[in-house]
Each structure stands twice: as structure tokens, then as C-alpha cells.
Image: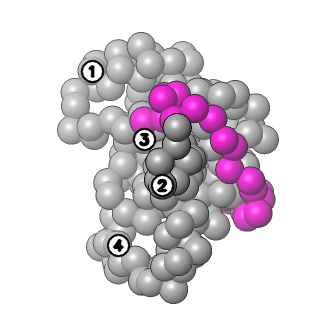
Amino acid sequence: MLGKMMDQPLLISNLIAHAGRYHGATEVVSVETTGGIERADWSRLERNARRLASALERLGLGAEARCATIAWNNRRHMEIYFGVSGGGFVCHTINPRLHPEQLIYIVNHAEDRVLFFDRTFLPAVAKLREHLGAVDHFVLMGPRDDEAAAMIDGLVFYDELIEQGDPGYAWPQFEETRPSS
């Protein structure tokens, strides 16, 4: 017997879709790693999260593929959290204050396929790259940066990655007990 409650899975994608639909114009303010203030709204965050999930599928990631983040709390990190989890992948947030050997162990043990990172961690990630065997895609959270591209071969830039994604991407539906974060 069903009660009068909603009969839908409690998915991360439902949260961001709700925010985009009912609070789309509500401002979201974040402080970027450069110290600047960035202003967006929930509709932009939802659109970018959809684009990211779509772009990750196009990179060949399958269900429950792990995507690590080494980042501070900002707009892009929030889009990644919603986009990765909403797309059916696992968002693996990593404490950036850990020792390099700990980071290597954690990323390899989790078999993270994608590593998203803030510009402030570029030197550390460049040094760790050769030890992160499972990572197929290193994604700098920001716009194209030629200096960064010279440090890591095949570096992907977040802003370009989401431009390749579909803003109308249909969130997949799956069991709410499936791993997501």
C-alpha cells in the first residue's frame, strides 16, 4: 500500500532539477580560488551539471565510474558534485590537505577515472600524475590555461568540457541505493 507521499527515488539529480525549476533565478554566490566573487543562479548550475553528466558519458564513463575532486568549495565544485552524482557516477571528494602519498593511495585504491582539480593544486597534481594509473582524464576546474596545459599532457579544461555537453541531458533514473558519493 502506498501512502500519500511521493513515489520517486531520492536522487541527487532530483534535488538540482527542483532547484533549477522552482528557484532558478535565486542567486548562488561563491568565492573563487582567485579571491574573486562569482555570481550564478540555480538554473545555470543545473544546466552546467547536466552538461557535465552528458560530457562524462561522451568520455566513455560507465555507470558508477568514480570521479575524484581535489578542490575548494566553489561554483564549479558544486556543479561537479551534482553532475557526477546525478549522471550515475560516483563523486569522490578528496581532502586536499592530505600528504601526496595518501592522495596517490586514495585515488588508485578508488580507481578514479577522472580527477577534477582547482588551479591551486596544479603543481601537486602535475607531480602526482605519473603515479595515478587509473586516471584517464585530468580536468582543471576553469578556463583554458596554456601554462597548465604545458605541465600535464592531455589536460582537459572544465569550461571547455561542459561546453561539449548537452544542457537538455535527461537525468538517468536508477535505484536510490546505488553509489553516488
Residue ID at (51%, 18%): 111
Residue 77 in picture, x, y percent from top left = 43, 55
Residue type (three-letter) at the residue carrying disc 4? Ser
Residue type (three-letter) at the residue carrying disc 3? Thr
Residue type (three-letter) at the residue carrying disc 2? Lys
The answer for how far apart the CA atoms under marks 4 and 3 are is 17 Å
Residue 43 in picture, x, y percent from top left = 57, 75
Q: Which mark is residue 69?
A: 3
92 or 126: which is nearer to us? Answer: 92
The answer for how far apart the CA atoms under marks 4 and 2 are is 38 Å
Q: Which residue is mark 1?
A: 102
Q: Which mark is residue 115?
A: none
Residue ID at (52%, 28%): 178
Residue 50 in picture, x, y percent from top left = 66, 57
Q: Is residue 144 visible?
A: no
The answer for how far apart the CA atoms under marks 3 and 2 are is 39 Å
Q: Secondary structure at mark 2?
A: loop
Front: mark 4 or 2: 2
Question: Which residue is outermost to the front?
Answer: 1
Please tell me how many numbered marks the rendered image carries.
Answer: 4
Residue count near mark 2 (Cα–Cα under 10 Å), binned few <14, some 14–19, many ≥20 = few
Residue count near mark 4 (Cα–Cα under 10 Å), binned few <14, some 14–19, many ≥20 = some
In primary-sequence order, the first of circles 2 and 1 is 2
Q: Which mark is residue 4?
A: 2
| Residues shaded magenta | 157-181
The answer for how far apart the CA atoms under marks 1 and 4 are is 29 Å
